[in-house]
Image: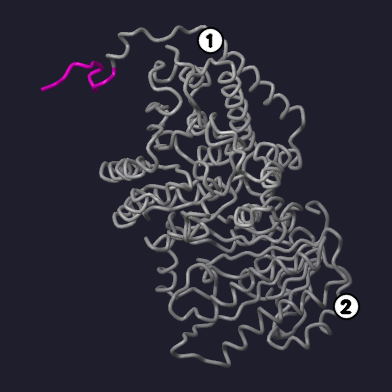
Amino acid sequence: MADERRSVVIVGGTAGIGRHLAQVLAKRGDEIVIAGRDRTRAQSVAAEIGGRTRGVAFDLAEPATIASQLADVVKVDCLVLTAIERDNNSVREFDLGRAQRLATIKLVGYLETAHALASRFTPEGSVVLFGGQARERPYPGSTTVTTVNGAVSSMVKTLATELAPVRVNAVHPGIVGDSPALQGKTELLKMGLARTLTKRLVTMDDCVSAVLFLMENRGSTASTWWWTAAGRFSELLTEGLATAKTANSEMSDRAEDARQSPGATTRGEHVAEATRLSIFRTMVEIRRCLKRANDLFLQNLVKGTMHLGLGQEAVAAGFAAAMEKDDYTFCTYRGHHHTLARGVSMTLVLGELMGRQCGLMKGKGGSMHLTSVAHGMMGSYAIVGAHLPVAAGAAWSAQYRGTNQVAVAFFGDGAANIGAFHESLNLAAVMKLPVVFACENNLYMEYTPIASVTAVKYPAADRAVGYGLERIVVDGNDVDVVLRAATAAIAKARAGDGPSLIECLTYRQGGHSRADPAKYRPADEVAEWLKRDPVVRYRDRLRELGIPEATLASIEADAVAKVEQATEAAKASPAPALDAALTDVWADGGAAWRN
């Protein structure tokens, strides 16, 4: 549809964003119907816009009049509902009439317009609704606006279901800096500007760009887009995927929550193809390397035990793609996937697991202590939760030195019940430290279901409010979702706006360690999560986005070759000499006691 003339209806097209959109579309040659409350004004604006533009008039607050005014619209490729009613209505000084009018415009008028045109949408048609950021960031006097904009987000899901295959999405732009209606309102503009990280308000051009993208992208539906503090628009969690309940109802509820994934809607995210392929390469290499580590253990070439992150690749790859080279990573003994994601070679990782001189720690650390300062990988910690205050300390150091670095601390769901977790969050929030706490909730703390020992549904995110932080729960098996959440949180931290806590719902594809056969997990639960394998899922998405099969196969073949080469190099490396035990104990490289 991007290269064809479209038939577009813009409700609220006589002013502001709607009018600006109509002007852009008119230059493309589209047939446009703009609707406003006043017929004379609508026809006058249509004449000014020119091209194939005409004006009609109706008031969304009087929904009974809508259908008749749109009766002569033959077909609709896109309906844009951008009409708004500015309202400053608090609970203490409540204007009932204004509240009723605003609610009618968006909650009834929007729906009636969609109803009136439902039979005339083309099969590949789309609807774009406008809300606002007051739903996420209420302010004094936004009582009605906040409530109504929240309802717009729910309306999207209903319309997407009932109008399918017509796509329905919502945009929440917040304060638009160059909107004619806001000119001269200095305090309001300052308030909006203070909430952005880039110190830049979105513009009408930004809004039009978002609408055009949603009009033309066939992979996005039932989604809610809003401009983050970084001045870009991003998509929130949307489409739910229905699945069967498992025998373990508590665990099933958590698995089902994670299955509420943006899936299809994230396919249109503005991520460069090179970035997508890099992320896919990272995930595939992690998967291949960890599987090889498992094989080497079974061959008795890895001593002790291992705690592999098979199935959790999306968390590592998504965060790594959002981080700068000098940012800090802190993780647990299940940290191989994060180590690889930060760029440490397979040879160094496999060599360390096998206790060889070529290993990352020269064979002295083993599976649970992978560290590479050169890669920003500041350690894997075997004591549950012990690294969280260390990560906060690193963030404080960056803040004190003014380096603009961000620390990211990964931890399991069980650590959310550890005292260090709460102490670290409190300190980070009080000091506004540039740190992101990322919980990899794989449903089990060692052998125990996290739900059986935790008072809240989400062990990390549901505690966030206690420290003044936003409750963020994302699908940790969808790398696009992880990337988006990580990018926003890291940008917030880097701008000096303090920490974030993100709970990533995921699932380990094996036991707690190599010593654990994981027989305690219900078979149907395991089967359901395996269907949502993050690597397979992302591969399928890339193919749907038009990435050639040959390109994906080449990346997979490269990963296989790298694993083979790393395996042979590690096997060929000798074990560390005995005197190596007396090196690197102190910062000077030796072991001599310093009195």
Q: Secondary structure at mark 2?
A: loop
Give me the C-alpha separation between circle 1 and circle 2: 76 Å
Question: Which residue does the numbered mark 2 point to in the structure image?
Answer: 72
Question: Which residue does the numbered mark 1 point to in the structure image?
Answer: 571
Q: Earlier in the sequence, mark 1 or mark 2?
A: 2
Q: Secondary structure at mark 1?
A: helix
Of tags 1 and 2, the one toward the viewer is 1
Q: Quadrant of residue 186?
A: bottom left
Instruction: Identify the residue shown where x is 73% and y is 69%.
Output: 158
Colour scheme in the image?
A: one colour
Asked whether, in this view, residue 146 is left or right of residue 581, the answer is right
Instruction: Identify the residue shown where x is 29% and y is 54%.
Output: 431
Give the amino acid at mark 1. Lys
Give the amino acid at mark 2. Asp
Q: Nearer the viewer, residue 66 or 304?
A: 304
Across and down, in percent, residue 363 comes to 41, 16
Q: Quadrant of residue 86?
A: bottom right
Magenta-tinted stretch: 584-595
Classify mark 2: residues with Cα within 10 Å, few (<14), some (14-19) or many (20+).
Answer: few
The quadrant the C terminus occupies is top left
